[in-house]
Structures are given as structure tokens and as C-alpha cells.
Image (cartoon, helix red, strand yellow):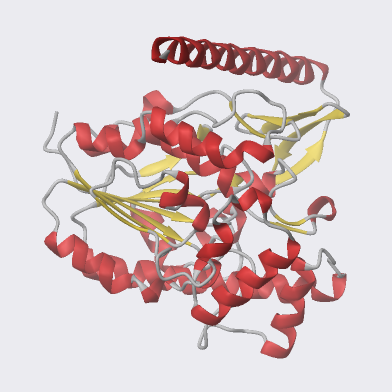
Amino acid sequence: MTEPRDVVLVTVDSWRADHCGFMGYERNVTPTLDAIATEGLVFENAIAPSPETNGSVPAIFTGAYTNPDLESDAANYTERTRRHMKTSRTLPQRFSELGYETAAFTANPWTSRYFGFDRDFDHFEDFMDENLSSGLVEGGSDKRGLASDLLAQLLNWYQGQDMFMAWESFYDDVVDWIDDADSPYFLWLFLVDVHMPYFPPDGYRSRSRLLTYPANVSLFAGRYESLFHDVLVDTYDDTIRYTDDFFRRFFADVGDEPLVAITGDHGEAFGENGVYGHGPEISEETLHVPFVVANGPTGTVDRPISLRQLPELLPALATDGSYEPFLEPTVWARNYDPAILVRGTNWRYEWRPEGELLETRSNGEWTPTDDPDLARLGRELVETYVENERERSRLLEATDAVAESAAL
């Protein structure tokens, strides 16, 4: 085993793969990352565990979903996530076991200490103490209605918190922590600038505020008028361009010493299947994310990889540079509708109670197909995944029962 490397994981909220130059995007929105990807390791088929943060990041941190049961359980999301983060072996825990100092800076309330994400970090900053809307979260985010959600967004917009918290507002704190950290260290950064609503700062805005504000209001109102489509795509790209500037500044400050893994927690839709944003669809747009590693191995990997592999993958990259053991012929993702995706290198199978969708990719384009062998393989893999998850659910229930009995 080589000397352990310092490791930085940067997660970019709502970042879809095909809006990056190094993934084939024609717009020049990621010049820094394009240069990094040229000299780094690129996973061309990285798949998020879920099309939304509250389903994806807990799985990225632990390798397992918070709720093995495929049925929706939104009402108990808060306690379920807290229990999951408390009882699971987490990504920072694995680094701590290797003697790493650990820290996190996250501007996303879904990954705050409120849900237990601070566990196993020596230093954790979620900026919730200064958040004007934090009182609205008490009692459970699941119980907030539309009015309180809108009020929270207005308060956060005024203060520059939550999804409006620009990376520049805590950048100096990050660099200060790195300067004081003992090596080896593990640092997690969660950037939210790309998350809707899309409000790029001055100097990065390609559209007038007179258009960007009503376009974003239309998203929150659930009205996805085609009139705003181009505006939303342009402002989304502007936020990516702004985030790319984070990497330009960050690599200038830290150089080539730490191993830096960069990915999205899920993607974003812009009218595909009539959907904007993320959450309801297990589509290519909401699950296929960029994933590049700098200052480590080099090359391009086309076999699929699930971000649920990160708890094992990152320590391996940091200690011996290996990643091949974590590549698979197929990976899977899900939401709680329920809907399940099986994803190969050039084929994908979606299963829902109301039907299935099979697609293959050729020349970068996905098209539906009726290949009976692939369809049968997709069904068999879904059945296997579902049974494995149900077995895990039964084991967790049995463990809880034993623990409760012992406590009597």
C-alpha cells in the first residue's frame, strides 16, 4: 500500500453529464474541467443512485438506500434518514478508520446535521445556524406545505442561503481548513449553485433578469411553458460555468497534491418526457452524471459505475490507485414511485408497475428497442435487485426487533 493521499470529494447538485465539454457538450461551459479531464480519469457512464438528493446522497455515503422497501415512505423520511446515517458505515467513517482527518462543507439542507450527515466528520459546516428559515424545518421538512416552502425560499434568497448559497461565500473557510488540516485528510464539498432556481451571479449571466426571474418562477409554480425553455437551459449552463470557476480557483490554490473526485449527486431534466427539474423520473438526464478524478489515475472508463461505490472506491484510489474492481456490467438506480433502472454501457431498462421501457444507445443517441433478450435480462435483474433489497429490509426489521427486546 502506498502512502495515503489527501482526498477531496466535490459533489455538484443537479449536474447532468451531457452539459460538460468533456462529455461531448458543444457549449464551452466547463473549460477548467475539460482540461482536468484530459489529464485525469473520466468515468463516462457514472450513474447516481436516485434522481434527487435525499435519495441519492445517503446511498452515496453508505452504499445502501435509506429504505430497502420499494414502497414510498415519505412521511417517515426524516427519522429514516437519521437512523440510516447513524447505523450505517459511512464514507467519512471509512477514511477516519484509515487515520484521516475529515471535514465537510455543505450548503444543501438535505445533507445537513439535521439529517445526521455530520456523523464521522471531525469538522462539519452546514451553515444552518445562521439560516433565517431553519425554524421552518423544525418539526420535519416532510410536513412543510407550499406556503412555508415559498417563505423559506424567500428568506434564503434574501440571505443567500441554501440553494442560493454561492460557493464564494464559504470558499475562504474551505481553504483555511485545508491549510490547517493534518495529512492525510478527507474533505467533502457540496456545491449547490447549479440547483434550481438558476440564478447565476453577475458576470456569468447570459440572460436578462427580466427573463430569468419569471422563468424560474414557472418552475416553482409547476408551469413548464416552452417559452422559457431556452432561458432555463441558458441560465442552467451559466451556473455550470460559474461552478467551473470554482475548480479553476480551487486547483490554483491546492495544486496537484490531493486526489480530487468531482461528480454530481443527480442530473436535471429540461423538458424530456415533459419534465423539468429532478425527482419524478429515472431518466438518463436525471441519473447520468459527470464523474472525473484529478491528480490520480488517468484514462477513460466506459463501463458503468454506480456512485454507491464511492465509500469503497475513494479509499482504494487514495491508497493504491485501483478502480477496476468497482466496475460492473450493469448498475441500477431507483426512486420511490417505485421505479427501477438497470443501466449497462449502451443499454438501459426502466421498470415501473405500469410498464417498462428498453433503450439502446448508438452514436450517443438513445432510442427505444424491442430486443426480447435485453428485455428479459432487464426483468431478471430487476427481480434480483428487488429481492435483495427486500431481504435487507427483513434483516433490518429483525435487528430492530432484537434491539428492542434487549432494551426491555
- Total marks shown come to 0
Quadrant of the image occupied by residue 180: bottom left
Q: Position of residue 221 (x, y in %)?
A: 80, 68
Q: Residue at x 62, y 15 (%)?
A: 390
Res. 33 in view = yes
Q: Residue at x 42, y 38 (%)?
A: 61
Name, please, the residue furthest toward the front: 408
Could you tell whether 203 is left or right of 354 in the image? left
Q: Nearer the viewer, residue 15 or 169?
A: 169
Quadrant housing the C terminus: top left
Q: Residue at x 52, y 88 (%)?
A: 202
Could you tell whether 121 is left or right of 407 in the image? left
Could you tell whether 407 is left or right of 197 in the image? left
Res. 263 in view = no
Q: Position of residue 64 (x, y in %)?
A: 50, 28
Quadrant housing the N terminus: top left
Q: Residue at x 68, y 39 (%)?
A: 74
Quadrant of the image occupied by residue 149: bottom right
Q: Position of residue 333 (x, y in %)?
A: 62, 33
In the displayed structure, 174 sits above or below 118; it is below
In the displayed structure, 211 sits above or below 173; it is below
Q: Position of residue 394 (x, y in %)?
A: 58, 12
Q: Nearer the viewer, residue 305 or 391?
A: 391
